[in-house]
Image: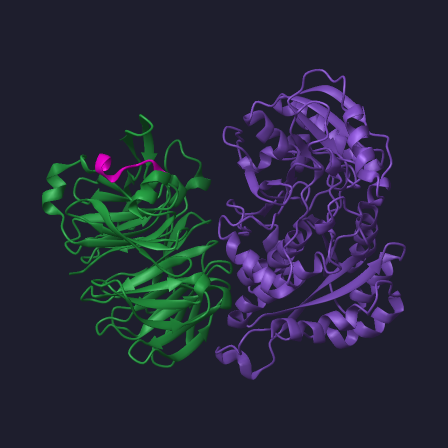
Amino acid sequence: MITRRTAILGLPPTILVAASTRAQAALTGMAYATNEKDNTISVIDLAQMKTVKTVPTGQRPRGFDLTSDGKRLLVCLGDSNRIDILDTTSWKVVGSIDTPDPEYAALRQPGNNPLYVSNENNALVTVWDIDTQKMLVQMPTGVEPEGMAVSPDGQIIANTTETTSMAQFFSYGTGKNVANVLVPPRPRWAAFTHDGSEVWVSSELGGTVTVIDAKTFKVLDTIHFVIEGLRSTFIQPVGINITRDDKRAFVCLGPANRVAVVDVPERKVLSYVATTKKVFNATVQKYLLVGQRPWHAGFTPDEKYLLTANGLSNDVSVIDVTDLRVINTVPVGQQPWMVLVSPS
Amino acid sequence: MTQALVTENCSTQFRMPGRRVVLSAFAAAVGTGLALPAFGQPAPTSPAQSTPTPTLTIGYVHWQHSVETISYIFTPAPDNGRAGAEVGITDNNTTGRFLNQNFALATLDVPTNSDPVAALNTLIAKGIRLIITDRPAADVLKLADAGAPHGVTMFNAGAAEDALREENCRGNVIHTAPSYNMLTDALAQYLIWKRWSRWFLAYGMQPNDLLLANACRRSAKIFGAHLVADRQYKGKAGSRETDTGLVELQEQLPVFSQNAPNYDVLVCADENSVFAGYMPYRTWDARPVAGSAGLIPTSWDPNSLEFGGRQMQDRFVAYAHRFMTALDMNAWVAVRMIGTAASYAQSLEPDKIMAYMRGPDFQLGAYRGLSLSIRDWNGQVRQAILLSDSGRTVVSMSPQPGFLHQVTVLDTLGTDKPETKCKLSMAGKG
């Protein structure tokens, strides 16, 4: 698989390893990226900074989550209409949940159960007991539910509906819809601050992040992104990652090929980190631009690095969170959608 | 389940078996078919359900006609356009169930030679004020003028004539269909980006062919292309279904295009499927074809999967059991514009919906990257235009990189504010 992939990309992983020796020492562990187009998961060894395994999956893997011990990976297979539970050592499928067009799934923590799923084409959020693989409840949503987040106390589920531009909130206990907040067009992602006070919602077409009070569901602020020399229409916020201390948020800006760094208490953009990087390709003897269209990102457990899944250039950028620069780029499969680093 | 419900509540009552239906049949049917449920969706969990949900019914004066196409697989389905509006209604209701808003569609199929104003009056009598149509340009004007005293806003989903947006503009029409100028500007930008600037323009004999040809000439001038040949195709359609038709075409079309100065691309203006579809692979010189065949500018293509388009295509195919056309998209856009404005305005009153829709904050995501909004000077919906390889793949999307505009790059497509001939103020119209 690796041979085939590098042949397509013309990017032998070995060429890309050289970038930073300092970072290699600090980085360890495994990261996983779902490749929407070639139906695989890339397993990245961060110590080696390369894809060491390519796991075939069902069709159209997009959103996924990991159990807190990192031993199980739950991947949404949109076109196979199921979620597979994979063992991250043997890479065998150890369980499956049949559910139509899942786009994103998140485990309730602590406890790794239940599992919340956005069923994109069915306008539903479904909740599953992953031990019995039975559905507990389903909640109707607006058109194309996608982003989902569970409040730190586990009581509120936030969902974004792409086509009908709502951030929707549901009570965990009753499954009842408790609030609907209209936001700028095409909301893609929701993230709670770790203190549970705010929900941040990205609007891909609106080019904004809306900050919503997690108790009153009132809009507190709207964050805009302005990048000199770049058309505003290329600025399409998607993934949001907030640091555990609630000081910084990293917002993937899609076709802007950048990640915005936002001061969370001030709700101000501090800087933009370009995910793109020129990498010399020995096969074609040319510099190629990698790191294009980051959609979703994942921190390393120490939050010293942030990895972005770059859907257009088929790679994962590794950003040094202290220096705010890309230190490495790892080729993965076709059209990576999401990347997470194993917590263990 | 979705399909079954819609058939019971809408299709069979408005569309009688067979293709030719008289208007009087509809008048009786309208009354029973208006209150559609939020079809296909599970019951909402919102507490507002104890009282009946307020419903806004959107009208659709649907042109029932058969269209000859050169490519058999592109023969329009009888529900072309209507299915797009119906999926839009479902999408509106998926949101509306959380906002205590319900939407329904009342479609009246009107055959070519029937009076569309009679259908309009039927809808007006039912209290319907927001009405979509895909009738030809002359009928759009008739409907707009007949509806104006009743506060009707028409949504033009079909007619591309620029005059409808310019010298004949009406304050109570919103054009979700792109105009000829928008389509040819979108094509011109791409051809210029390709540096294919020497065009051979071939146009047909019908009035709308002449309009489209003029739009091509205008776009060429604006974006710096040169018409090195400008020829009318005077052959007639009709021989193509006979057993020797292909042989004749193979001989006739090279002759039509021979002795041309050196050109980069053959641009066809053929609104009535007479010749353009035959041009690829039959030109005298080996040249690509664009315009009405080959590389086609369009508001939608069933292969468009970017910007979340995959979800739209999946949803449409699941509902209609066929692919989504540009007319389906234009009708879907009209219904979703109404639904979106109703969400943000928090009202089902047509006046409040239209006020929000025409306001500065309105935008609609429609799977083409940049969001859609209304040009306040003539009611045209600004939108990106896809360039389709005759329905097989999406080649590109305009506006192209490098074509700049002081307000929005979408206004590099079509007639811009400083050039408009539309004299009507939008405010207070309709």
Quarter of the image with the N terminus of chain B in it: bottom right
Tell me, what colour scheme is on the image? by chain
Residue A84, how many percent across, how many down? 34, 67
As drawn, is B110 to the left or to the right of B155? right
Q: Is residue B125 magenta?
A: no
Q: Is residue A14 magenta?
A: yes
Residue A266, how many percent across, how many down? 26, 50
Is residue A163 visible in this depiction of the protein?
Answer: yes
Q: Residue furthest bottom?
A: B50
- Residue B185 location, quadrant: top right
Residue A312, how many percent across, how many down? 39, 42
Is residue A145 visible in this depiction of the protein?
Answer: no
- Residue sitting at x 60%, y 67%: B90
Foreground: B361 or B38? B38
As drawn, is B430 to the left or to the right of B122? left
- Residue B191 location, quadrant: top right
Q: Is residue B88 above or below residue B7?
A: above
Chain coloured green: A
As drawn, is A324 to the left or to the right of B161? left
Where does the magenta region start and end? A9-16
Foreground: A317 or B22? A317
Chain coloured purple: B
- Residue sitting at x 66%, y 49%: B326
- Residue sitting at x 13%, y 51%: A28
Foreground: A266 or A113? A113
Prevalent SS, magenta region: helix
Residue B400, how many percent across, how many down? 53, 33
- Residue sitting at x 52%, y 30%: B404
